Amino acid sequence: MNIDEIKFDEKGLVPAIVQDAQSRAVLTLAYMNKESLQMTLDKRETVFYSRSRQELWHKGATSGNTQKVESLHYDCDQDAILVQVTPAGPACHKGDYSCFGESVVNEKTSPKAEPYAILDQLRDVLAERKATLPEGSYTSQLFQEGVDRIAKKIGEEAGEVIIAAKNNDPDELSMESADLLFHLLLLLTDRGVSLEQVLDVLEKRHN
């Protein structure tokens, strides 16, 4: 990225939209000046400019909730930046995964955008669990136990799917398949592989 191409405003700032590189969830909206943007490029971690404190702010420097920069892009007008990151903890100062947790749409009455929307929702939840590791969460426990434990669970669930299929029980097969899909998505999240990458492989094979 050529910093000289960025159009900073009259205060020398540019808005930075921070997005989880894996889940694609928007984590926060912050601001950068020329110095903080250069530091972000150098450190490969987000460094912002605090408008309230009027000082540079290295995200996670004290809390440990850093954001590893995976890519940076500026928009067509060159006056906004998209920063895709791998978060090491909550993005919000309230301890939430994202600063955009509040919904202004009644989710119970809004129609589903697509029949497989639950996969996107589950992907977002798993990314949040990996970033925040809340206590008492089964998912957090698996993330902490590591890839060997997660892989073992996939083997167990795959066996259950086979048994359900041989039992010719549609309800049992549906439930066991759901368990298998959940643990597969958990493994992908743990290894930093997005669902989109898997779907791209399927699409290429189909074509």
Image (tube, grey):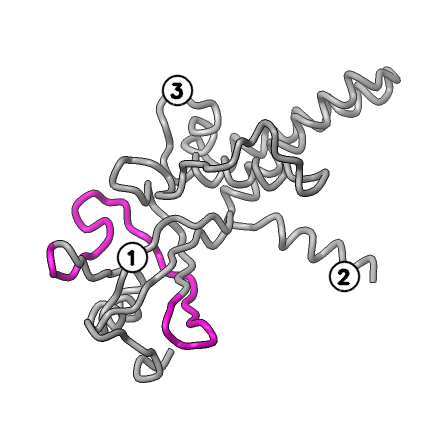
Q: Secondary structure at mark 1?
A: strand
| Figure check: 150 above or below 72 | above
N-term mark: 1 or 2: 1
**Where residue 147 sits in the image (x, y, percent)?**
50, 37
Q: Quadrant of residue 82?
A: bottom left
**Where residue 51 sits in the image (x, y, percent)?**
17, 58
**Where residue 81 sits in the image (x, y, percent)?**
38, 67
N-term mark: 3 or 1: 1
Q: Secondary structure at mark 2?
A: helix
Say what amino acid the circle numbered 2 marks. Lys
Residue shown at the point (57%, 37%) measured from the top left: 121
| Figure check: 85 above or below 81 | above
Residue shown at the point (55%, 36%) measured from the top left: 186
Asked if residue 126 lies in the magenta stretch, the reply is no
Left or right, residue 103 beside residue 34 = right
Asked if residue 55 lies in the magenta stretch, the reply is yes
Q: Which residues are magenta?
A: 53-81
Q: Disc number at residue 159?
A: none
Left or right, residue 59 beside residue 129 = left
**Where residue 175 sits in the image (x, y, percent)?**
72, 21
Residue shown at the point (61%, 48%) measured from the top left: 195
Say what amino acid the circle numbered 1 marks. Ala
Marks 2 and 3 sit apart, C-alpha to C-alpha, by 40 Å
Residue shown at the point (76%, 23%) measured from the top left: 174
Front tag of 1 and 2: 1
Which residue is denoted by mark 2 in the rendering? Answer: 204
Q: Disc number at residue 136?
A: 3
Q: Quadrant of residue 158?
A: top right
Q: Nearer the viewer, residue 1 or 74?
A: 74
Q: Secondary structure at mark 3?
A: loop
Which residue is denoted by mark 1 in the rendering? Answer: 30
